[in-house]
Amino acid sequence: MVDVLVVVGVGGMGEAIARRLGAGKQVVLADFDQVTLDRAAATLRGDGFDIHPVWVDVSSKESVMALAAAAAELGPVRQVAHTAGLSPVQAPTAAILNVDLAGVAYSLDAFGAVIADGGAGVVIASMAGTMVAGQFPAEFEAALATTPSDELLALPFLQERAIANQGVAYGIAKRANQVRVQAASLTWGGRGARVNSISPGVISTPMGQSELAGVSGAYMRMMIEGSATKRLGTPSDIADATAFLLGSSSSFITGTDLLIDGGVVAAIRSGALQLPTA
């Protein structure tokens, strides 16, 4: 049977990943926005890819489980890339927690139950998660990593009154992605599969451009200018890294996070880049 590639979220990164990895595979494209999903499916089909579009609401466990089941019915699920997410300028705190945090937990569970032997998964987290690492007590991160998915959003420190704003919610959610992947690597390993996360910096996608045009735009441009590369990342940068982590060349890599930020975090931690505090 022909191998299946699943791409959850078909914005700039998702479409680039499908294009980079989809040749010769059955490609399941999943998204909440039907217009975006139909456009990406039509474009990729026109370029010769075997596309199976599926509407999904990643904030719903049942919807994600149905997606995983549909993908597994097509053939062996060898590669999964979860790119779906909301940024602080796009959504309120509750939506960010539902989509960026719980949605990833549901996806790790659902695809961890169907991933084929020798398969691999990648979750798109964010450098925001790396930047807040170490700011929380150990028990906070342990709860984010191991609390059953159905109970995650009931954790006291994830209640909206305990979170200052959307930016804080986003950082927590992306840190949760990183530690959740670490924990999930053991479950995936039981099926002979691997799973890792990628933490992009500022990437030139519609979401990234929205953030640059929003209230945090000046802050983000300061990070870009203070980095070693001094440029925006591209969807192709992320697709190339995803191809590595989903391929055989990374067979000894699982449960880890790959930071792809053009050197922003390195500049901050070295003291060369000093960002204003809130």
Image (spheres, rainbow, N blue to C red):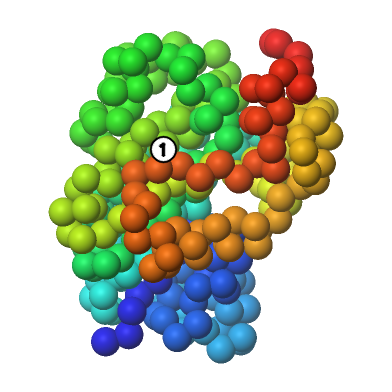
The quadrant of the image that shows the N terminus is bottom left
**In this orientation, which residue lies closer to the viewer: 49 or 253?**
253
Q: Name above or below for residue 33 compared with residue 49.
A: above
Residue depicted at x 34% and y 44%:
255
Residue type beneath disc 1: Asn
In the rendered image, residue 89, in percent from the top left (x then y), is placed at 66, 34
Q: Residue at x 21, y 53 (%)?
A: 189
Q: Position of residue 97 (x, y in %)?
A: 44, 32
- Which residue position holds label 1? 177
Picture residue at 76% right of the left edge, 17% below the top:
274
In the rendered image of this protein, does residue 177 appear above or below residue 54?
A: above
Find residue 251 and report its horizontal and vertical position in percent: 35, 61
In the shown orientation, is residue 201 left or right of residue 129?
right
Q: Residues within 10 Å of mark 1 (few under 14, many from 20)?
A: many
The answer to whether any part of residue 60 appears in the image is no
Helix, strand or loop under label 1: helix
